[in-house]
Image (spheres, rainbow, N blue to C red):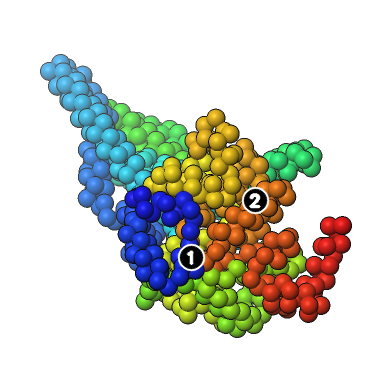
Amino acid sequence: MGSASSTSAAAGLPFAGVPEELREKAEELLATEPEHPELHVEFHAIDPDTRSFTLRTFLGPRKWAVALAALLVVVETVSLQLGPLLTGIAIDDGVRARDFGVVVGVFVAYLVAIGVNGLSGFTRIRFSGRLAEDLIYDLRIRVFSHLQRLSLSFFTDEKAGRLMTRMTSDIEALTLLFQDVLVQLAVQGLTLVTVAVILFILDPVLAAITLLLVVPVMSVATLWFRSASDKSYGAVRDRIALVLADLQESLAGIRVISAHNRRHHNIVNHRNVVGHYFDANDRVARIGAIYGPGTEAVGVIAQAVLILIGGRMVLRDELEVGELVSFVLFLTAFFAPIQQLVNLYNQYQAGQAAMAKLRDLFDTDPEVPDAPDAVELPLLDGQIEFRDVSFGYDPGELVLTDVDLRIEAGETFALVGPTGAGKSTVAKLVSRFYDPTSGEVLLDGHDLRSVTQRSLRRQLGVVPQEPFLFHGTIRDNVAFSDPDATDEVVLGACRAVGIDDLVDRLPLGLDTPTHERGSSLSSGERQLLALARAFLSRPRVLILDEATSNLDLLSEQRIEQALDVLLEGRTAIVIAHRLATAMRADRIAVIDDGGVVELGSHDELVAQGGRYAEMFATWQEHLR
Ligand SMILES: Nc1ncnc2c1ncn2[C@@H]1O[C@H](COP(=O)(O)OP(=O)(O)OP(=O)(O)O)[C@@H](O)[C@H]1O
Ligand SMILES: [Mg+2]
C-alpha cells in the first residue's frame, strides 16, 4: 500500500463530508488505493453438475483413475485365488501321480502368483490411497467454501456442532469409504464371483449342490441384515452429531457453565447424549454379532455337507481327491469375503449416510443470494433509506412493520429503544445479512438486492454487538479486511480508537496473540479492537451496535471524541443504550413496537416530551 493511502487510513479520514472541491482529489486517491487482492476462489457448489452429490457424480470426473484401480483389484484378487487350484493340481497330478516335477512347478507357480499379488496390491493401495486423499481434499474445500457462501440465517438456525460433524466425522466416514471400503467391496465381491466360477469349472454338480445349500439361507440373512443395519446407521449418524454439538457448546460456554455451577449437570447431560450414541452403536454391533457368526455357522455346515457328498463322490471315483481338497479350500475362500462384506457394508452405510448429510448441506442455497444481474455498488455517498420495510426472522412473527426511514449521507444517526425492539435488526438489514420480508432497503437509491454483496460490504463497516476476535495477533485482527496493511496503517487505526497505548504497553505490541473468543482481552479491549478493525477498512457507512457498551467512562469519553472525528463525513448508524452516546448524534430514532416511534434531534425530542424525553429524564435522574 502506498504512503498516500496509509496516511488517509491512519487518520481514518472519511471522504463524504469532504468539500466538493476536494472531493475529486479524494476519489482519485481512493481509486489508486489497491483493493484487497481478489483471491481466486471457486465455489464448487454453485456448479449445477455437482448439485446432486452422490457417489457417481463425485467419482465421475475421475472415472479413469477409478477404472485403473479396479483393474489392479482384479489382478490382485485373481492372483490370490490361484492357491487352492494349485494345491489341487499338486495333489492329483504331482503327489498322487508321484511326479515331483509337477510339485516343483506348482511351488514356482505359487511364488509367481504371490509375487504378482504383492506387486499389484502394493500399487493398488498406493494408487487408490492417493486417489482417496485427493477426493477428500476436494471435498473438504467444497464443504468449507459452501459454508462460507451461505447466509447468516443458516448459521443462526443450525447448531455449530452439527456443522462441525459434517467436517469431522462425516468426512472421516467418507475418507474410510474412499480409502478402503469401496476397494474392499470390489475385492471381496470379485473374490466371491471368481470363486463361484472356479467351483463350477471344477465340478458343476458339486458346485450346484453347495450353492443351493448356501445361497438361499445367506440371501435371507443378508436381506434382514441390510434393512436392520440401514436403520441403525441412520441413528448412529444423528447421535454422533448430537454428541459433537454438545461438546462444542460446552467448550464454548465453559465460563458460564462454571459460573453457574452447571459442570455436574452438564456431565450428566453429556453422559446421556453419549449414552444414546452408545445405544445406537450397540444396536449396530448386535446386528453384526448375529449376522457374522450366523453366516460363519452356515459356512461350516456347508463344509461338513461338502465332505459328506464329496467324499462319497471320491469313493465312487466321480471326483479326484485333489479336486475335493481344492473344493473345500475354495469354499472357505468363498465364505471369507461374505464375512468381510458384513463389516464393509456397515462402513459403506456410514459413508452413504455421511454422503446424504453432505448432500443436504450442498442443497442448501444462500437465503440472501446475489441477483443474477447484480451490479457493483459505486462509491457511496451513504444515504440510507427504508421504504415500507417489514421484516421477521420467522415468517409469522414480524420484528419490524412498515418502517419508513431516511438517513442522509454523512449523518450520524442514533437508534435507541428498549431491549429486543429491533435495533440490531435494522443494522442487519442495512448490511443485508437478511432481506426484508416486504419493502426495500436502499443505499444511495440502489435497492440492496440489486447490488453485489461484495461491493456493498466493502463500503460498510460493522461493529457488532458481540465482537469476535480471530485466533492470531492483534495485527491480524485489526487488519482483517486488508491483510496487507502496513504496521503504520494498523497502528493508525489503533490510535484512532485510542488503543495505541494498550498496544504500546503489551510487550509483543501488535504481535500479541489473540484467541478465538478473545478471552485474553477484556470485553472493552475487544470492542476497541473491533472498532479499529472497522475503521481500517475505511467504510463509507459505519454501523456501531452498542460498540461502546463495555467501556468505562474514561475510555468511553475518549472514544466519543475519537468517534466525533471518525464519523465526520461518514454515514453512521449508532445503536446505543447509553444516551450519552445517542445525544451526540445528528438525529435519533426511538425504535419500539416494530417501528420508529419518535424521530428528531436530541433537542427536538426532549422538547417533544415523549418517550425519548422520558428516557433522558430518567437518565439524568441517575446521574445526580
Ligand atoms: N436470529 C434471530 N432469529 C429469530 N429471532 C431473532 C433473531 N435475532 C433477533 N431476534 C428477535 O428479534 C427481535 C429484535 O431483536 P434485535 O436484536 O433487533 O433487538 P435489539 O433492539 O437490538 O435489542 P438489544 O437492545 O437487546 O440489542 C427480538 O425479539 C429477538 O428475539
Ligand atoms: Mg441489539
User: In this orientation, does residue 439 appear?
Assistant: yes
Q: What residue type is labelled 2?
A: Arg
- Mark 2 vs ligand 2: CB under 8 Å? no
324 left or right of 486 in image: left
Front-lying residue, 331 or 311:
331
Of the numbered discs 2 and 1, the one sitting upstream in the chain is: 1
Please identify the quarter of the rendering in which residue 401 is found: bottom right
Where is residue 117 shown, x and y percent of the image? Answer: 24, 30
Front-lying residue, 54 or 294:
54
Q: Circle 2 sits in a helix, a strand or a loop, which is it?
A: helix
Labels 2, 1: front one:
2
Q: At 41% across and 47% down in the image, what residue appears? A: 485
Q: Which amino acid does label 1 sit on?
A: Arg
Q: At 49% across and 44% down in the image, what residue appears? A: 491
Please identify the quarter of the rendering in which residue 543 is found: bottom right
Q: At 84% across and 67% down in the image, what residue appears? A: 617
Residue highlighted by disc 2: 558
Residue highlighted by disc 1: 540
